[in-house]
Image: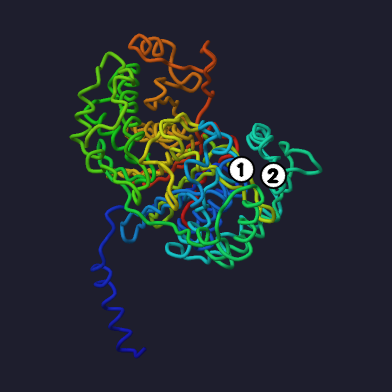
Amino acid sequence: MSRSIAILVLLLAPLLAMAQPKPTHPLPPGAAVASAHQLATDAGIEMLRQGGNAFDAAVAVSSVLSVVEPISSGLGGGGFFLLHDARSGQDVFVDARETAPKAATPARYLTADGEFDRDRAENGPWAAGIPGLPAALVHVAGKYGRLPLAKSLAPAIRIAREGFPVYARFANGYMQRREVMERYPGTREVFLRNGRAPKEGDLFRQPELAATLARLASGGHDGFYRGTTAQRLLAGVAAAGGAWTAEELAAYQVKERAPLAFDYDGWRVVTAPPPSSGGVALAEMLQILAPWDLKALPEAERVHLVVEAMRRAFRDRTFYLGDPDFVRIPMRTLMSPDYAAGLRAGINPDKATPSDLLAGKPTPLEDEETTHFSILDAEGNRVSATQTVNLLFGSGLVPSGTGVLLNNEMDDFALKPGTPNAFGVMGFDANAPEPGKRMLSSMTPTIMESPGKVAVLGTPGGSRIITMVLLGVLGYADGLDAAQVAALPRYHHQWEPDVLGTERNALPADVVARLRAMGHDVLVPGEDSAGRRSSDSWGNMNTVEWDRAANRLRAASDPRNPVGKATVAPAR
């Protein structure tokens, strides 16, 4: 460069800097990662320190969770990734939900006498949809990350090869599913050591999964959906009596969809579109509740109104929602404030609405063992991601030579219309299985933004995911911080069965009494005499927040989960 040009550049530099648009808000003072396992959180921070962004960190966190949480998620499952790109200001939803194999017709899930075959729906090869998570890792890394896929997957490969300590939830969950897990030779090869089930404190190594991850790292999409891994998956499914084809495995692709977005109490809420049912239900519930000052109400009255909103949203979920590529969903109606106003008008502020009084047919117009992580980086990029294999350890089937535990997401279809799935949620034609169709999900990764704050949140919990995210959104709207939101007590209603379930000690005794006087059938752990059960604690929320006014980051992993970890890393 000549001296005269150099001088001109120096003289113009201040003017050029002034001409650049200044950000409306300061950049975050660092990055924050919250996930359900400390090794996954550490992997995300590792990618950020190696020059990656939130999307590289998401690939690392997701893949490590796939190694250390086979109870919850894995390469044999799927998930949803809600991404916010700070540079463009755009939000995108990456749909990596599993798809139905061609052979999985409704008739396959009936017994000889026409009854629903729940064992086939939940266990083994017929329970499994075509996995989507590996494709999501490739897609997010290639399109949004800045590090090579092999670098982002390196922590997961290392941990699978070297092992990690078995934790209590892993060991206890295995014992619950042991009978199913040990039906299959490939599963026994992975989980049994000299015939012994994994125990807390054992070092759990997965060399076959490490090799599968390495093939994904080197071959991308084809490294999983074609070639050696695909051949072993197909052989393992066939050996167990299933019927996948090489063509449908190779054809799997993620889909980018426009997220849902709506306003609530000064917040812009961005969340999951169908085939998630969570975003629509979240919008419906919040718009029903919008006119009430919930924070000012006595607790029983607040809970009553929130439950009535839950009841109505879950009723609509049952009849209208499914894969938008296969069914017509009345989105404009379901997302409309006017529709919400009509539903609100039917709420008696002093009395519960029996669910059987809400129409039980259309009107004109994931076990809790899923996992979630939240990330915000120093550039302002955000990731809210929920991934799953559905129930504890999915289908229980590991095709030999892969280390891949397959999902049991086929149970999330309405395999027999009107018959509840494992979570007690019903569905009808909109969510019936068809070749290549994505089953309806409750996963609800969500990002909230107000003039003073950004929050990223989500949780596992089956059908309770939706209501737990609702309570989290309401918590942030009430001014709570990340730790307080993650620790909020939880309650849930899903239209049918007509029961208000709670965690132990979620509601004071006088509030429970008042709700029962209003007509709510409140199920409290340890109190019920009719043989019904409600677990003591629900979910595993992981959330991060950026307080723009104070330019401060907070991250929280659910206190219910002793192996979760939330980390705030200051900018370097």
Amino acid type of disc 1?
Gly
**Residue 431 point in image, percent of width and height:** 39, 41
- Give the alpha-carbon distance from disc 2 to disc 1, as whole Å: 8 Å
Answer above or below: position of 135 versus 548.
below
Q: From this view, report whether residue 538 is shown above or below residue 190.
A: above
Q: Residue at image x 52%, y 42%?
A: 108
Q: Residue 33 carries which label?
A: none
> How many labels sit on residues?
2
Q: Nearer the viewer, residue 547 or 214?
A: 214
Residue ranking furthest to the bottom:
2
On the image, the x and y values in percent for residue 231 come to 62, 61
> Is residue 189 among what the camera can see?
yes
In the rendered structure, which amino acid carries the disc numbered 2?
Answer: Tyr
Residue sitting at 27 percent across and 13 percent down?
350
**Res 565 seen here:** no
Among numbered discs 2 and 1, the one appearing first in the sequence: 1
- Pick the front one: 146 or 324: 324
Counting from the top left corner in percent of width and height, residue 541 is at 47, 37
Tell me whether circle 2 and circle 1 mark residues in contact (CB < 8 Å): yes
- The answer to which quarter of the image holds residue 246 is bottom right
**Mark 1 Cα within 10 Å, few/some/many (few <14, many 20+)?**
many
Residue that lies at the very extreme toward the front in this rendered image: 113
Which residue lies at the image location 30% right of the left edge and 80% below the top edge?
A: 9
Judging by the rendered image, the residue that carries numbered circle 1 is: 124
Secondary element under disc 1, as helix, strand or loop, is loop
Quadrant in which the N terminus is drawn: bottom left
Q: Disc 2 designates what residue?
A: 184
